Image: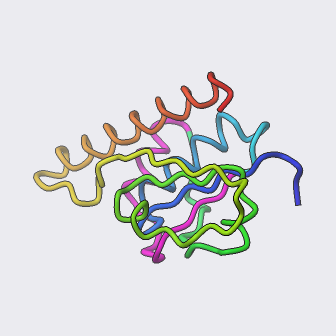
Protein backbone atom coordinates (compact mmCIF):
# COMPACT_ATOMS: atom_id res chain seq x y z
CA UNK A 1 0.00 0.00 0.00
CA UNK A 2 1.27 3.44 -0.85
CA UNK A 3 0.79 6.83 0.73
CA UNK A 4 0.41 8.54 -2.63
CA UNK A 5 -3.08 9.85 -3.53
CA UNK A 6 -5.03 7.22 -5.47
CA UNK A 7 -6.72 8.01 -8.78
CA UNK A 8 -9.33 5.46 -9.88
CA UNK A 9 -10.38 5.79 -13.54
CA UNK A 10 -13.75 4.22 -14.33
CA UNK A 11 -15.47 3.39 -17.60
CA UNK A 12 -18.11 0.94 -18.73
CA UNK A 13 -15.87 -1.91 -19.88
CA UNK A 14 -12.34 -0.93 -18.74
CA UNK A 15 -11.09 -1.68 -22.25
CA UNK A 16 -10.23 1.69 -23.92
CA UNK A 17 -10.66 5.09 -22.30
CA UNK A 18 -9.95 4.11 -18.71
CA UNK A 19 -6.95 2.06 -19.88
CA UNK A 20 -5.58 5.00 -21.88
CA UNK A 21 -6.06 7.31 -18.88
CA UNK A 22 -4.43 4.75 -16.58
CA UNK A 23 -1.46 4.46 -18.95
CA UNK A 24 -0.91 8.19 -19.33
CA UNK A 25 -1.36 8.97 -15.62
CA UNK A 26 1.12 6.24 -14.71
CA UNK A 27 3.58 7.47 -17.34
CA UNK A 28 3.22 11.18 -16.58
CA UNK A 29 2.24 11.26 -12.91
CA UNK A 30 3.00 7.82 -11.50
CA UNK A 31 5.65 9.37 -9.28
CA UNK A 32 2.92 11.48 -7.61
CA UNK A 33 -0.15 9.24 -7.78
CA UNK A 34 -1.15 5.63 -7.38
CA UNK A 35 -3.25 4.82 -10.46
CA UNK A 36 -5.88 2.15 -11.00
CA UNK A 37 -8.68 1.66 -13.49
CA UNK A 38 -11.78 -0.48 -13.68
CA UNK A 39 -15.16 -0.83 -15.33
CA UNK A 40 -18.73 -1.59 -14.51
CA UNK A 41 -17.90 -4.76 -16.48
CA UNK A 42 -14.60 -6.19 -17.71
CA UNK A 43 -14.58 -6.29 -21.53
CA UNK A 44 -10.88 -7.10 -21.93
CA UNK A 45 -8.11 -4.81 -23.10
CA UNK A 46 -8.87 -3.37 -26.56
CA UNK A 47 -5.97 -4.14 -28.95
CA UNK A 48 -6.41 -0.79 -30.72
CA UNK A 49 -6.02 1.03 -27.39
CA UNK A 50 -2.78 -0.89 -26.83
CA UNK A 51 -1.64 0.03 -30.35
CA UNK A 52 -2.32 3.78 -30.08
CA UNK A 53 -0.68 3.93 -26.66
CA UNK A 54 2.40 2.15 -28.07
CA UNK A 55 2.48 4.86 -30.75
CA UNK A 56 2.58 7.42 -27.90
CA UNK A 57 5.41 5.53 -26.18
CA UNK A 58 3.29 4.06 -23.37
CA UNK A 59 2.98 0.28 -23.00
CA UNK A 60 -0.36 -0.80 -21.52
CA UNK A 61 -0.21 -4.34 -22.92
CA UNK A 62 0.28 -5.75 -19.41
CA UNK A 63 -2.82 -4.02 -18.01
CA UNK A 64 -5.83 -6.07 -17.04
CA UNK A 65 -9.49 -5.26 -17.54
CA UNK A 66 -11.02 -5.22 -14.06
CA UNK A 67 -14.44 -4.74 -12.50
CA UNK A 68 -14.86 -1.92 -9.97
CA UNK A 69 -13.61 -2.88 -6.52
CA UNK A 70 -15.59 -1.26 -3.65
CA UNK A 71 -12.55 -1.15 -1.34
CA UNK A 72 -10.43 0.68 -3.94
CA UNK A 73 -13.38 2.95 -4.78
CA UNK A 74 -13.75 4.05 -1.17
CA UNK A 75 -10.04 4.57 -0.50
CA UNK A 76 -9.46 6.57 -3.68
CA UNK A 77 -8.60 10.24 -3.47
CA UNK A 78 -10.12 10.84 -6.91
CA UNK A 79 -12.69 8.76 -8.78
CA UNK A 80 -12.80 9.90 -12.39
CA UNK A 81 -15.43 8.54 -14.77
CA UNK A 82 -14.61 8.73 -18.48
CA UNK A 83 -17.99 7.87 -19.98
CA UNK A 84 -21.55 8.89 -19.24
CA UNK A 85 -22.72 5.34 -18.55
CA UNK A 86 -20.08 4.84 -15.84
CA UNK A 87 -20.83 8.28 -14.41
CA UNK A 88 -24.55 7.47 -14.15
CA UNK A 89 -24.05 3.92 -12.86
CA UNK A 90 -21.00 4.31 -10.63
CA UNK A 91 -21.50 2.43 -7.37
CA UNK A 92 -22.23 4.53 -4.33
CA UNK A 93 -19.06 5.89 -2.79
CA UNK A 94 -19.47 5.67 0.98
CA UNK A 95 -16.32 7.67 1.82
CA UNK A 96 -17.28 11.38 1.89
CA UNK A 97 -13.65 12.39 1.30
CA UNK A 98 -13.50 10.87 -2.20
CA UNK A 99 -13.55 13.51 -4.94
CA UNK A 100 -15.62 12.31 -7.91
CA UNK A 101 -15.22 13.92 -11.32
CA UNK A 102 -16.59 13.16 -14.75
CA UNK A 103 -14.34 13.64 -17.78
CA UNK A 104 -16.46 12.58 -20.75
CA UNK A 105 -14.82 11.22 -23.89
CA UNK A 106 -16.35 9.53 -26.94
CA UNK A 107 -15.97 5.75 -27.04
CA UNK A 108 -13.43 4.96 -29.78
CA UNK A 109 -14.54 1.31 -29.72
CA UNK A 110 -17.81 2.46 -31.29
CA UNK A 111 -16.03 4.17 -34.21
CA UNK A 112 -17.04 2.96 -37.66
CA UNK A 113 -15.53 3.22 -41.10
CA UNK A 114 -12.26 2.03 -42.53
CA UNK A 115 -9.49 0.80 -40.28
CA UNK A 116 -7.71 4.15 -40.81
CA UNK A 117 -10.84 6.07 -39.78
CA UNK A 118 -11.32 3.90 -36.69
CA UNK A 119 -7.67 4.30 -35.69
CA UNK A 120 -7.96 8.07 -36.21
CA UNK A 121 -10.80 8.10 -33.69
CA UNK A 122 -8.68 6.13 -31.19
CA UNK A 123 -5.85 8.62 -31.68
CA UNK A 124 -8.20 11.60 -31.20
CA UNK A 125 -9.52 10.19 -27.94
CA UNK A 126 -5.97 9.30 -26.83
CA UNK A 127 -4.82 12.88 -27.39
CA UNK A 128 -7.87 14.35 -25.63
CA UNK A 129 -7.28 12.13 -22.59
CA UNK A 130 -3.55 12.94 -22.56
CA UNK A 131 -4.32 16.66 -22.70
CA UNK A 132 -6.79 16.39 -19.81
CA UNK A 133 -4.28 14.47 -17.68
CA UNK A 134 -1.52 16.98 -18.45
CA UNK A 135 -3.91 19.76 -17.32
CA UNK A 136 -4.71 17.86 -14.12
CA UNK A 137 -1.00 17.42 -13.35
CA UNK A 138 -0.21 21.05 -14.18
CA UNK A 139 -3.00 22.39 -11.97
CA UNK A 140 -2.04 20.03 -9.14
CA UNK A 141 -5.59 18.63 -9.04
Q: Give the range drawn in magenta.
A: 35-57
Query: What colour-coding does the image apply?
Result: rainbow
Q: Is residue 130 above or below residue 64?
A: above
The reply to whether the magenta stretch includes residue 21 is: no
- Residue under the point 42% across and 70% down: 89
Residue that sits furthest to the top in the current view: 138
Residue that sits furthest to the front in the current view: 96
Q: Quadrant of the N terminus?
A: bottom right
The reply to whether the magenta stretch includes residue 44 is: yes
- Residue under the point 68% across and 27% down: 140
Q: Which of 42 and 91 is in front in this view?
A: 91
Residue that sits furthest to the left in the current view: 113
Q: In this view, does 62 lie above or below 53?
A: below
Q: Residue 107: give x, y in percent of width and height.
A: 30, 55
On the rendered structure, is 62 left or right of 83?
A: right
On the rendered structure, is 130 left or right of 138?
A: left
On the rendered structure, is 123 left or right of 102?
A: left
- Residue under the point 42% across and 64% down: 86
Q: Residue 57: give x, y in percent of width and height.
A: 54, 37
Q: Nearer the viewer, residue 16 or 70?
A: 70
Q: How many labels does the image show?
A: 0
Q: Residue 116: give x, y in percent of width and height.
A: 19, 44
On the rendered structure, is 109 left or right of 14?
A: left
Q: Is residue 89 above or below residue 34?
A: below
Q: Residue 7: give x, y in percent of width and height.
A: 66, 50
Q: Which of 66 and 71 is in front in this view?
A: 71
Q: In which quarter of the image is the C terminus?
A: top right
Q: Which of 13 and 63 is in front in this view?
A: 13
- Residue under the point 35% across and 64% down: 85
Amino acid sequence: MTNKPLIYFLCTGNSCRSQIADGFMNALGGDRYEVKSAGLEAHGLNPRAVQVMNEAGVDISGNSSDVINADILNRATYVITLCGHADEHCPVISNPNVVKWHWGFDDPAKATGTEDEIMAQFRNVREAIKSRIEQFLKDGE
